[in-house]
Image (tube, grey):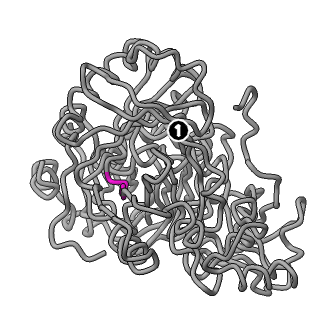
Amino acid sequence: MNPEELNYSETHEWIKIDGKVATLGLTDHAQSELGDIVYLELPGVGAEVTAGSEFGVVESVKAASDLYAPLSGKVVAVNDAATQDPALVNRDCYGEGWLVKVELKDPSEVENLKTAAEYKEFIGA
Amino acid sequence: MSMAKAIKPPLYDRHVSLGAKMVEFAGFVMPVQYSGIIDEHVTVRENAGIFDLSHMGEFYVSGKGVPSALDKLVSNNVGKLGIGKALYTPICTPQGGIVDDILVYRDEDETFMLVVNASNVEKDYGWVVSHLPKSLKVEDKSLQTALIAIQGPQSEAIMAEAVAEDLSELRYYQFEYSVIDDIPVRVSRTGYTGEDGFEVYVDAASAGAVWDALFDLTAGIGGVPVGLGARDTLRLEMKYCLYGNDIDEGTSPLEAGIGWTVKFDKGDFIGKDALGEQKKDGVKRKLAGFVMVDAGIPRHDYAIIDADEKSIGRVTSGSYSPSLRENIGLGYLDLPYDDVGTEILVDVRKKPRLARVVETPFLKLIGGR
C-alpha cells in the first residue's frame, strides 16, 4: 500500500526526494484514519518550514489535526487543487493529493526518515 | 463516566464485519463510520440509513401516580401524553440547568419508558430514583435493550416491508408494538436526523435477527449503515442539541432554544422557579447557529469574539455540513449577537475567522413532517 520508493515520517507524511526538492503528502494510513478530509490549511510559497514543527492543518468532518514538517526548508510549491478539493487527499494521497514541495535546507535530515518497511512496522500494519 | 472496560453492544460483531471504524463512546464500543461520514450523511438525506443506537439508556417507571410524579421531574407535560405517544423533554436542576434531555414513552396509563443519553445513564438513574416517590418502580433496562434506527425519506418503505402494520397511520412521535421475524419490537416514529424515520427497540438478546432483517431491506434499496459520525452531522444541521456539547447542567432550556419543552402552565416541577425568573428577566445568551464566511471549521469550545475582540460566547458544536457544503456551528452568544445576520469571529487556532449568525435549523427540509 505504501510505495517502496518513498520515505515516511512518524507524523504520517510521505516524502519523495528529487534532488534538492522534497514533495510531501499524507500517507494512506493517515487519510484513512482521518476519514473524509474537508479542509486543508497549507503554508504559502516562500514560507520556511522546520523539521518536527507544524506547517499546516488537515481537517476531516470529525476533527482537526496538525501537519508536521518532516524536513526543514522553503516551500516552493503548494497543491492548490488539494486545498480547493481536499477530498483529493482521500482519493489519491500518493498522487494528485500531494500537499507541498519543499526545497531542502539540510539534505542530511533525510536520514531521519523511515523506509516503507519501517513505516509499515511503525503503524502496525 | 470512568468505565474500566468499554461494553461491546449486541451488534458489535456485525459492525466489525461491515468494516466499521469502532470508537469508544460513553463506555461503549460503537461504530463511528462505515463507508465514510459524508456518504452516510448524504444517503440518509436522499434515501435511508440504518443506525445502531444500543448505547442509549432505557428506564421503565411504573406504579400508582406515575404521570404526576414524572410531571414533577421533567419540564414538559407528561400528564397530557396519550398512551402510544412519545415526548421530548429536559430533566432540569433546581437552578434550571439540564440534567439530561430524554424521550418519555407512555406505554400504559401508569407505565412509562424513559430513553436517556448513554453518557448519563448512571447519573440519570440516581436522579430519577432520588426524585420519584419510593412507592414507584424504576428499572434500568439499558443493557437488555437494543435500539436500531431507520432514518431517511425511504424509511417508511423499508419498515412497511418489515412489519405487518400499516405505518402510514403512525404519526411523528407515536409508537406501536409489532414483530419483526417473530421478535417483539417497539416501533417509534422518532429520530435525530430531521428526516422521516423510525426507532426500533428490541430485547438485546434478539437484536441480531432484527438488525439483519432491517439491514437487508435498507441495503436492498441502496441505503447504508450509518455511524455516530454522520449521526452528529445530521443532527447538527437540524440544530438538535447534543448533551454534553450544546446543553448541560450549566445551560437552560430557554437559553438552548428548547423553551417549548418547558410548560409553565402545568403544576410544579424541578427548576420551574429558576426558569420562571429567567423567562421574566429574559435570558442573557442564546444558542445560535452560524455559518463560517472565512475558511476554517468551528469546533467545540472555540472562543467567539466580536470585532473589538470582546468575548461574546463559545462554540458548542461545529462541523463541515455535508448537505450545505459549508462549515457550520452552534454556540451560546451574548445577546444581541444572536440576531440573524450578525457578524461574529470564531477563534480558529488563534486566528479570528469571520462567521455570520443564520436562522436555524440550518437545513430547511422540504416535505418535513
Residue placed most toward the observer, B329 or B112: B112
* B152 sits left or right of B80 in the view: left
Q: Which of A51 and B190 is in front in this view?
A: B190
At x 30% / y 38%, what residue is drawn? B202
Q: Where is residue B195 in the image (x, y as percent from the top left)?
A: 61, 33
Q: Which residue in the structure is indicated by mark 1?
A: B84
x then y, percent, for residue A112: 20, 67
Position of the N terminus of chain A by quadrant:
top left
Using the image, determine if residue B56 lies above or below residue B183: below
Q: In the image shown, does B212 or B353 lie closer to the viewer? A: B212
Specify whether A8 is left or right of B160.
left
Q: Give the secondary structure at mark 1.
A: loop
Which amino acid is tagged 1? Gly
- Residue at (22, 48) in percent of width and height: B9
Residues in magenta, as a range: B55-59
Residue count near mark 1 (Cα–Cα under 10 Å), binned few <14, some 14–19, many ≥20: some
Name the residue located 37 percent from the left edge and 61 percent from the top edge: B118
Q: Position of residue B324 (x, y in %)?
A: 69, 40
Query: In the image, residue A39 lies at what x, y percent?
Result: 56, 51
Residue found 46% across the figure and 41% down from its top: B37
Whether B337 is drawn above or below B186: the answer is: below
**Res. A92 visible in picture:** no
Closest to the observer, B239 or B257: B257
Q: Is residue B56 magenta?
A: yes
Q: Main secondary structure of the magenta part?
A: strand
Is residue B250 covered in magenta? Answer: no
Farthest residue, direction front = B64
